[in-house]
Image (cartoon, grey):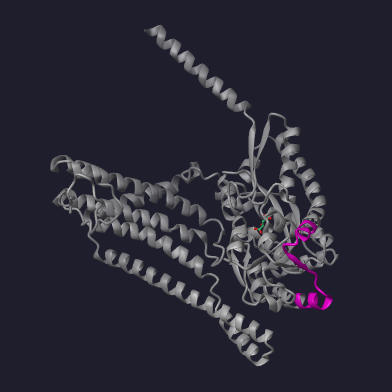
Amino acid sequence: MMVRRVWALVLGALVLIAGAAHAADAPIIIKFSHVVVPDTPKGKGAQKFKELAEAALPGRVIVELYPNSQLYKDKEEMEALQLGSVQMLAPSLAKFGPLGAKGFEVFDLPYIFPDKAALRRVTDGPIGRDLLASLKSRGITGLAFWDNGFKIMHANRPLRLPDDMLGLKMRIQSSKILEAEMTALGASPQVLAFGEVYQALGSGVVDGTENPPSNMYSQRMHEVQKFATLTNHGYLGYAVIVNSKFWDGLPADIREALTQAVAASTAYVNELAERDNADALAAMKATGKTQFLTLTPEEHAAWVEALVPVQDQMAKRIGHPLLAAIRAAAAGQAPALADNVVPPAAAPATAETPLAKPVSSPLGADAGPLAVLAVLVAGLVALAALFARIPALDRLEETVIGGLIAAATLLIFVAVVQRYSLSGAAAGARFAADHGQPGVRAAALGAFKALRLVNLTWAQEACIYMFVWMAKLGAALGVRQGIHVGVDVLTNRLGEKSRRPVIAFALLAGAIFTGIIGALGAVFVAHLSQTDQTTPDLELPVWLIYLAIPIGSYLMCFRFLQVLFAYLRGGDLPGHGHAPVEVPGVTANEVPA
Ligand code: LMR
């Protein structure tokens, strides 16, 4: 007996040692996710990086590529990187604004870079370096800038002059600058993830969008767009980024080899991007599906005149010193900078800031005090449920939910009316122009401009957040009123005596589960509150939205306990209301009230 136990122990230890040795030898996996197809500048750059990294570090590093939004769409990929679910990305520069890295928004400004050389002076100089460094406080290490190209405008209508954009629904990336750009043209900007654009264009959800030719061609957008204009009004490029925690934790020799692989792939991408875009344009022209318009100098001047004011309009947001430095660099003058032009990060630049950690376990080692606090709150909730009936809380809950439903409904109604009125006024102005009625055109244009004074681009986002809060608070109300989703197949079949402990156990399990979610949510929100991440449209701090999780979950926990104590005391459960699910063989009156 004794000998057998010793053997079992020795065997167990050997298995453990073998496992540990295997883990130590296992190659480092770098998941590189992106949203374009492999045959694009970014797709080719990612492939080149994979080849170079794996050749330099055979058996030590494996780069897994996930192109074409296969793994994550635009916004999710940023979150995935911060949470450590992927290690590497190359998002377009427009996608850094919602992270709070507003300096990156300069790249979206219309007509800010006259050519690639001007752009290169910014990305390869101190401004580019400072911008990449500003990501550190978000748990992100910026490694390089990759090119795509200058954007063209396309739709199902010829766009010769800015006025032709009037009333068009144009897809944009989630960027306040691009929103201002489309608004300046009289179009209605619609934020959509890149992977959804082809479908949205084909089905008429949006009328058009802006893209470098390589993106338009590789997503087959030319098949669903009749006209494109070579406006070259703005730049689209990428920042190659990694999760800082992952990057800083790599052995120094591996990090060095990967840095070199990034540098070599950067040179490769930036060399081929222009050619790729020219090839894509030629290929689209050859299909004859889209008609490509080249602007006359007068038409070009009209686009410049309509769009350049957006630069000054956005100067406050981006920071005047940064904008001045970019303009100087773009114009070929040495920018008088450097260290203070890129807006500083909210948190100190260290990989140890909250989102630098993979948050697979929000209750990480340093979350101790927060976790204790969160659990304490859960304890207080339990105590309150034991002793208190709080009518004021009941009323507040109902008022807030009712208020949110009313506000969301009203907002949706107003936004829909405004959108239809805008399209009507724009269509009227175009019709009048086509039929030579300048007076009618001026009146319709006036109505259009007046309607545009009320900016409701944030309405959709606001409604989503209101629904999030409604759902969380509504779930707690559902528990209180006995209308929360429940499965009572088992309890309906049990006798009165055995039913009681099962119901009590189910209620207790509900309370424990929601209490745990409340505590985890509280810690997560505390972490988020230390970052300066904002929501894309309203630019509210994101923690404010996520606050619905701890508040709603604690409230549900409280309601579960309240129902449990009332049940244990008097045997009453809140009414199930109408329409319990029919169970074959069980008559309606067997279902507990
Ligand atoms: C877009 O969303 O339009 C671009 O960011 C896609 C890309 O990554 O090139």
Quadrant hosting ligand 1 = bottom right
80 sits left or right of 226 in the view: left
Q: Position of residue 336 (x, y in %)?
A: 80, 65
Residue at 81% in and 50% down: 272
What segment is highlighted magenta in the picture?
282-303
Q: Residue at x 79, y 43 (%)?
A: 264
Quarter of the image for the N terminus: give it.
top left
Q: Using the rendered image of the protein, determine whether residue 216 is visible from the camera's viewpoint.
A: yes
Q: Residue furthest bottom?
A: 439
Residue 389: x %, y % from top left: 22, 60
Q: Quadrant of residue 329?
A: bottom right
Q: Is residue 165 left or right of residue 593?
A: right
**Picture quadrant of residue 172:** bottom right
Q: Residue furthest right?
A: 332
Q: Quadrant of the C terminus?
A: bottom left
Residue 501's place in the image compared with 339, above or below, is above
User: Above or below — where is 456 with respect to 373?
Assistant: below
Q: Is residue 393 magenta?
A: no
Relative image position of residue 34 (x, y in whole percent): 65, 49
Q: Residue at x 39, y 68 (%)?
A: 404
Closest to the observer: 182 or 369? 182
Does residue 144 appear anywhere in the picture?
no
Of 219 and 275, nearer the camera is: 219
Q: Nearer the viewer, residue 588 or 147?
A: 588
Residue lying at the far front of the rendered structure:
288
Q: Position of residue 210 (x, y in %)?
A: 69, 65
